[in-house]
Every structure is written in C-alpha cells, then in structure tokens.
Amino acid sequence: MRKLITVVSAIALLATTLAATPPPAGVFSAVSADPITFNIDPMHSSIGFRVRHLGLSRVNGTFRSFQGSFTYDPDDPTNSNVSVTVDLGSIDTGVERRDNHLRSADFFDVETYPTMMFESTEVRVVDAEHLEIVGDLTIHGITKSVTFEAEFLGMAPRRGGQTSAFEATARVNRHDFDLTWNMLQEGLQIVGDDIDITIQIEANTPRQR
C-alpha cells in the first residue's frame, strides 16, 4: 500500500511539473493571443546574398541598410505577414570597384531604383519550427513572386516587450528582374544567373512604458 501511495504521488508531481513548464523556444504557441508586431533590429540582423563567379567560386555580399517589420499571429501563423525594404545603395561585397558597378545602370541602377522590397502574400506552416513565406519581391522596378524557406528560432520576453528571431533563404534568377549584364572571360560567364538570398532577423516589439 505504501508503495502504491508513493507511485501515485510521483505521478502527480510529474504532471504538475509538466503543466507548469512552458513550451520550448522555437515552437509555435497554441495559446490564444492577439497578433504581435515586431520591428526589425538592424544591429542584430543581416540580409546577404551570394552568386557564382566564372561558374566556379561564390562571391558573397550584404546590404548594410534596411528596415522592416513582421506581424506574428500565435493563434494562426498563416495570418502572419512580413514587410522589408532594402537600400540597394548600401550593397557591400568588400570591393569598392565591384560595389560601384553593381550600383550602376548595368545592374541595380540605384539612381532610378533605389530600393528592393518584399511584401509577403502567404505564410505556410511546414512544421513546428519551419515556414514557407511567399511574397512579392520587387527589384529594378519588376515584381515577382518568391518563396522563402524560413526557420522560426524562438521568442522571449525582453526589456518590457518581446524579441523574436528567424532565418530565411531563397533563390532567384537575376534575369527575372532584368539584371542581365554579363561578359565572357576565356569562355566563362563572369556573373552567375542564380542569386542565393539569406536573411537573418532579430526583431522587437515596441517597449512598454
């Protein structure tokens, strides 16, 4: 009888502990709540890309200036949305001459088209930590639908509000946006056609006063 009481007590203690334990970070919450808007923190975020050079190595670059926000709906993540604007003049590949060429009319033509924009149109839940974010990507005055594969990294209280983070990747063909400049060097194409975009975002809700 004493053993039975001990077992029952242990089960009750375990059940109480599990009920009091919050879900792990990165898992979408099933608790009903209002949609939450986050503003991107540029100090802890990055928007980068890479492209093949001569069909061999890959050149990496980043954009130093961007802004945006996203709204996350805990009740239904498919109702979430993302909006990002990138200053194309802030492109940085580590080589000033190449960066100036990318800013020129041969590529982005930043004097005419100074920004790149992404506005989500659909969010699909893949599993507890992964999403597909479909949206309109506008570059060089041309808008195309692009799908980002995203990983939700978690959400936590911070400084009177909340901080959230995710990573996302997509591949686009630059010819879709009329970025067609190229030349051959000993039979090799200098600039590849496919561009891999990588986004790492940390964002915060407005601080509570």
Image (cartoon, grey):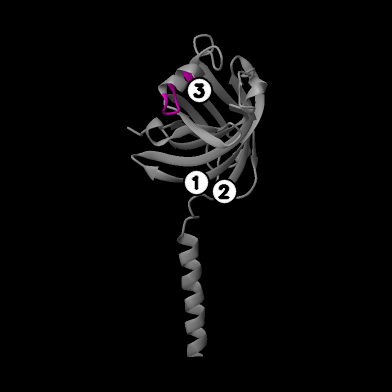
Report how far apart the C-alphas of labels 2 and 1 lie in the structure.
7 Å
Q: Are marks 2 and 3 in contact (CB under 8 Å)?
A: no
Q: From the viewer's perspective, is 22 left or right of 56?
A: left
Report how far apart the C-alphas of labels 2 and 3 lie in the structure.
25 Å
Front disc: 2 or 3: 3
Which callout, 2 or 3, points at the residue further toward the start of the chain?
Answer: 3
Q: Is 8 in front, or is 42? A: 42
Q: Quadrant of the C terminus?
A: top left
**Mark drawn on residue 129:** 2
Q: From the viewer's perspective, is 133 left or right of 65?
A: right
For this orientation, the residue located farthest to the top is 112
For this orientation, the residue located farthest to the front is 186
Q: Give the range drawn in magenta.
A: 86-95
Report how far apart the C-alphas of labels 1 and 3 lie in the structure.
22 Å
**Mark drawn on residue 112:** none
Q: Characterize the local packing of mark 1: few (<14), some (14-19) or many (20 or more) Cα atoms within 10 angstroms.
A: some
Q: SS for tag 1? A: strand
Q: Residue 197 appears in which quarter of the rendering?
A: top right
Which callout, 2 or 1, points at the residue further toward the start of the chain?
Answer: 2
Amino acid type, residue under disc 2 in the picture: Glu
**Mark drawn on residue 85:** 3
Please provide percent x and percent y for residue 173: 65, 28
Please provide percent x and percent y for residue 162: 41, 40
Q: Is residue 87 magenta?
A: yes
Q: Is residue 38 above or below residue 21?
A: above
Q: From the viewer's perspective, is 93 left or right of 149?
A: left
Q: Characterize the local packing of mark 3: few (<14), some (14-19) or many (20 or more) Cα atoms within 10 angstroms.
A: some
Q: Where does label 1 land, which residue?
A: 153
